[in-house]
Image (cartoon, helix red, strand yellow):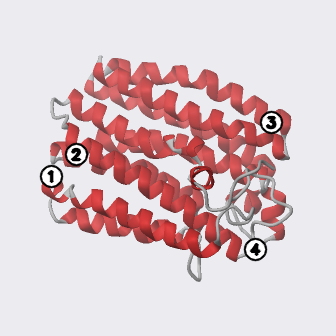
Amino acid sequence: MQKVEKNSLKAWMLASRPKTLAAGSVPVLVASGLAAHDGHFKLVPALLCLAFALLAQIASNFSNDYYDYIKKTDNEDRLGPARAVASGWIDPQRMLYGTLVTIALACAFGLGLIYYGGWEMIVVGAVCVVSLMAYTAGPWPLAYHGLGDLFVLVFFGFVAVVFSFYVQTLTFHYLAFVGGAVVGLAAVNILVLNNYRDRDTDKKSHKKTTIVLFGETFGRWFYLFNGILACLLCLLFFRESIVWAAILPFLYLIPHYMTWKKMVSINRGKALNSLLGETSGNLLILGLLLTAGLLV
């Protein structure tokens, strides 16, 4: 385990899990590309959405770090990257305070979106905050009852893309929902990889992820299927004659398949951690390809 000074900046940086932050940034990128295609791109609301999304994701990571420690899911058997609280890098109480402060910062940026999207954005932001806390906190945490994948698809896919598009255009377009599904499915694979790696320890801890519920074979094919379905959904852009947005994302399948082959080959253990950055990077590649297709 690497040496990290307690409660240091480095400890907080590691706790934010920077390798996974593409899940927060890519939806805004795709939504902005779609808004630009329609001639309505607005820089300020796009940046506010980006700040809110990244801070909300970091707050979720902090919350998971704290509550998995409290629930004793993070223990000496943990296979994933070291957690800040469980490793003693950050005091539990400070992590809880850090979570609340990060949520407050996210909400501060989110308030700026009221000017662009109306007072309804308060409801959207409130639902996002409550849901990110409910992921691992509360009496019935979503991640412990097989709903983690759905949470990622909804909030890092549909909600993030649709409302980032809305505050720039003041319209709801079905292609924003398509973009949300595309991004969300690829983002889900970050969680799938984590759950695939932790399937044995999660089972011992009574954490019922979809892979604990349905098995290793399901997890293996679920990862591959998500990427393929994401690309197939891009074909819907043909309906609006946005040809390159329908075609370019298929290049994503090359790195996606290569990462999947490594996952299947490694199968279990800490060696799977090396694929977290790859999976997040693949999501970024998909987002860039789709956005480029929208801008051509």
Q: Distance between the residues labelled 1 and 2?
A: 7 Å
Query: Is residue 145 visible in this depiction of the protein?
Result: no
Query: Element at badge 1?
Result: helix
Q: Nearer the viewer, mark 1 or mark 3?
A: 1
Image point (84%, 33%), residue name: 265
Classed neighbour count for the residue bearing mark 2: other residues with Cα under 10 Å, few (<14), some (14–19), many (≥20): many
Query: Element at badge 3?
Result: helix
Type of residue at label 4? Lys
Q: Name the residue under label 2.
A: 45
Q: Distance between the residues labelled 2 and 3?
A: 41 Å
Q: Is residue 7 above or below residue 94?
A: above
Q: Name the residue under label 1.
A: 116
Query: x%, y% of residue 49?
Result: 31, 48
Q: Nearer the viewer, mark 4 or mark 3?
A: 4
**Disc 4 or 3, which lies upstream in sequence?**
4
**Disc 1 or 3, which lies upstream in sequence?**
1
Query: Element at badge 4?
Result: loop
Image point (40%, 44%), residue name: 180
Query: x%, y% of residue 255?
Result: 63, 24
Type of residue at label 2? Pro
Q: Could you say which quadrant of the image residue 39 lies in?
A: top left
Q: Name the residue under label 3.
A: 264
Query: Is residue 170 visible in this depiction of the protein?
Result: yes
Query: x%, y% of residue 42?
Result: 18, 37
Which mark is on residue 87? none
Q: State the residue lying farthest toward the bottom.
A: 139
Q: Could you say which quadrant of the image residue 181 lies in?
A: top left
Q: Check contact, mark 1 vs mark 2: CB within 8 A.
A: yes
Which mark is on residue 72? 4
Q: Which of marks 2 and 3 is in front?
A: 2
Type of residue at label 1? Tyr
